[in-house]
Amino acid sequence: MPPHNRPPSLPRSRERHIPEPTLVLTPSQPTSSLIPPSSQTPSSSPTTKQQPKLSSPSSKTSLTYAQLDVIGVKGDGYKEGVERTRARIRASRGSELRAEAALAGPSEKSRDLEVEELDVLSSLDRYGFFTVPSHDRLVLLPSGPLLKRLTSVRAGSKSALSHAVSVSSLPAASSPLKEQTRVAKWDRMLEVLSRDGGGNVESWGIKASKEHKLRQRVYKGIPDRWRSAAWEVLMNRFSNSGRKATEELGKHYLQNLEKPSSYDIQIDLDVPRTISGHIMFHTRYGLGQRSLFHVLHSFSLRCHQCGYVQGMGPIAATLLCYFEPEKVYAALSRLHDTYNMHTIFSPGFPGLLQAIYVQERIMESKMPDVYAAFKKHMISTTSYATKWYITLFANSVPFQTQLRLWDAYLLEGEDLFIAVAISIVWVYRDHITSSSANFETILSLLSSFFVPEHDDSLLSWIERMLGDKKLRSQMTQWRQDWNDLVVSGRDGEALL
């Protein structure tokens, strides 16, 4: 039977005693609550050199999250919660009382659900969203242009409209028509590779007899109840690693929780505004927000060159919908190491510029009039595509579409999102080359939130594009060409 997705649980190694504070904002004991009392050494006592590090704003931030891991907060998932780490240092007595009242008591997990909680749960969509994110520009990504595969084309009618069809709201996240059939197919395709001492599945693999069906089934959409298992399989295959590597990365995650990070304050600022319409991340300092903070804190220490950048938040939050924090850290590490996200997140974003160079070469060779229009109107690709690559399209398409794209990304690697970028430009090519188009209309169009008419049409077009071996070979060569330009110092003039 497929594993059912559940909210991630906290690692047992972090379920430790921490003195309950009167005000979490200003804990009375400046020792690190991330270290269990029984294992504290003289070097971690308040009178040693460790104290200045723990009294920094960054350390107080991580300390607050650690304390709330033990105490919890009331109404996790449906209440707003109370701000603590960004509250004023000298809070009023009323603020103190509100903060204390928002802490969970011993009976929080065992009590019956309140009417308000039941109402919230009944309003959730299948992915856990109860608030549909609002976007300034919702535009339709029609399926018609996607019926024609990527070939060299000239501009369409000059009288074409310069704007796309607007959409009033996001589509409902309903189950695909063939969901149950695909659940059964994935059930037959996946096999158990290992179990723990209690008989629970530790790792999955693809049956040898079903290997030839993997690519086709990924592009048709991984059933949501199989997504966590399938994503782990795809990442293991792409990185040539397995369960032991995941466990080792999980240990690194826990070790990093004990260390200070200079990025904690910025991470804390970003956490509450990361997909807050999802029940896991709605409540301030709820389980989801705490898990997101811990993952980003630990990951910011993994690579000193990358540290932390804002785009990591939506990626980590999406992964937390399917994995517990240790595995999210392991997944981020694989994206960083083997999917080349290191180059996307590094200072100067070298991987981003390389992807944009490849995107421009495809546009120039397949859609020369579109490329000319960008040049004419002086529109740089970085001005609209940066957020696509930095967040892996997490803030540019509906959540269900994002998941489908990630299914294919974990199979294909970094070429996938170049293909997505090309598909968007391909669909709107006549709008871009219209005689009424200008800098503002084109940039506004490509900065929109795209709602595909049919996800299947979009994924099928991308599958055909990346199935073109000649084009994939050219993409590899263009990446090398970009690297050569960088080495020779000629990269500055190579992009639009």
Image: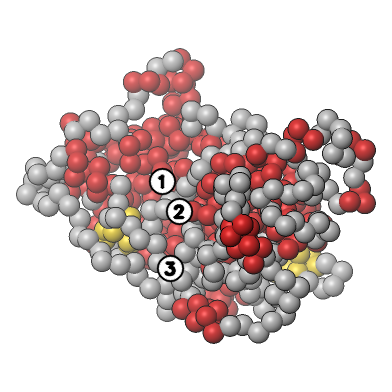
Residue picked out by circle 3: 131
Q: Is residue 420 left or right of residue 283?
A: left
At 33% from the left and 41% from the top, the residue drawn is 384
Q: Nearer the viewer, residue 95 or 35?
A: 95
SS type, badge 2: loop
- Residue 358 sits in quarter: top left
As displayed, is residue 122 above or below residue 147?
below
Considering every residue shown, the one lying at the far left of the view is 159
Considering every residue shown, the one lying at the far top of the view is 488
Residues under numbered marks 2 and 3 in contact, where contact means CB atoms less than 8 Å apart: no
Residue picked out by circle 1: 388
SS type, badge 3: loop
CA separation, marks 1 and 3? 23 Å
Please rate how many residues cluster around mark 3, counting C-alpha atoms within 10 Å: few if below 14, some from 14 to 19, many from 20.
some
Mark number displayed over residue 341: none
At 47% from the left and 64% from the top, the residue drawn is 277
CA separation, marks 1 and 2? 8 Å
Mark number displayed over residue 394: 2
Q: Where in the figure is residue 437, as x and y percent of width and height?
A: 14, 43
Please rate how many residues cluster around mark 2, counting C-alpha atoms within 10 Å: few if below 14, some from 14 to 19, many from 20.
many
- Residue 283 sits in quarter: bottom right
Would residue 217 be visible to someone looking at this image? no
Please rate how many residues cluster around mark 1, counting C-alpha atoms within 10 Å: few if below 14, some from 14 to 19, many from 20.
many
Task: Give the residue type at disc 2.
Answer: Ala
Q: Where in the figure is residue 367, as x and y percent of width and height?
A: 24, 41
